[in-house]
Amino acid sequence: DDFLNSSIVYKFWYLIISTMFVRFKYYYAWLFADAICNNSGMGFNGFDGEGKPKWDLISNVDVFNFE
């Protein structure tokens, strides 16, 4: 009842915060799966031009590009 009587600004703020926490649990699962694949060696994708190893062969999601 308090939520229905609150202002529209509060409702938008609540929506943004609550969906942010819901997204975080999925990001955690995706990044944890990436870490498991990299730890087992399945994520190794060779070396780049500078000789640094690339670990992006198996990747569930790129969080920064997703947002």
Image (cartoon, rainbow, N blue to C red):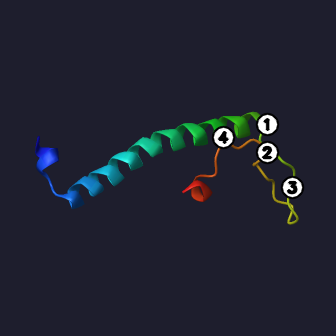
**Label 3 to label 1: alpha-carbon separation:** 14 Å
Q: Which residue is mark 4?
A: 34
Count residues near mark 4 (Cα–Cα under 10 Å), then give few for <14, some for 14-19, many for 20+. Answer: many
Disc 1 residue type (three-letter): Met
Q: Earlier in the sequence, mark 4 or mark 1?
A: 4
Q: Nearer the viewer, mark 1 or mark 2?
A: 2
The reply to whether the C-beta atoms of the residues labelled 1 and 2 are less than 8 Å apart is yes
Disc 4 residue type (three-letter): Asp
**Label 2 to label 4: alpha-carbon separation:** 10 Å
In the image, residue 17 lies at what x, y percent?
A: 33, 51
**Label 3 to label 4: alpha-carbon separation:** 18 Å
Disc 2 residue type (three-letter): Leu
- Tell whether 50 sits left or right of 23: right
Q: Is residue 17 depicted above or below 41 in this figure?
A: below
Give the residue drawn at x 66%, y 42%.
60
Count residues near mark 1 (Cα–Cα under 10 Å), then give few for <14, some for 14-19, many for 20+. Answer: some
Give the residue drawn at x 11%, y 49%.
5
Q: Which residue is mark 2?
A: 57
Q: Earlier in the sequence, mark 2 or mark 4?
A: 4
Q: Earlier in the sequence, mark 1 or mark 2?
A: 1
Give the residue drawn at x 79%, y 45%.
57
Q: Which mark is residue 42?
A: 1
Q: Earlier in the sequence, mark 2 or mark 3?
A: 3
The reply to whether the C-beta atoms of the residues labelled 4 and 1 are less than 8 Å apart is no
In the image, residue 24 lies at what x, y percent?
A: 46, 45
Where disc 1 sits, the SS reads: loop
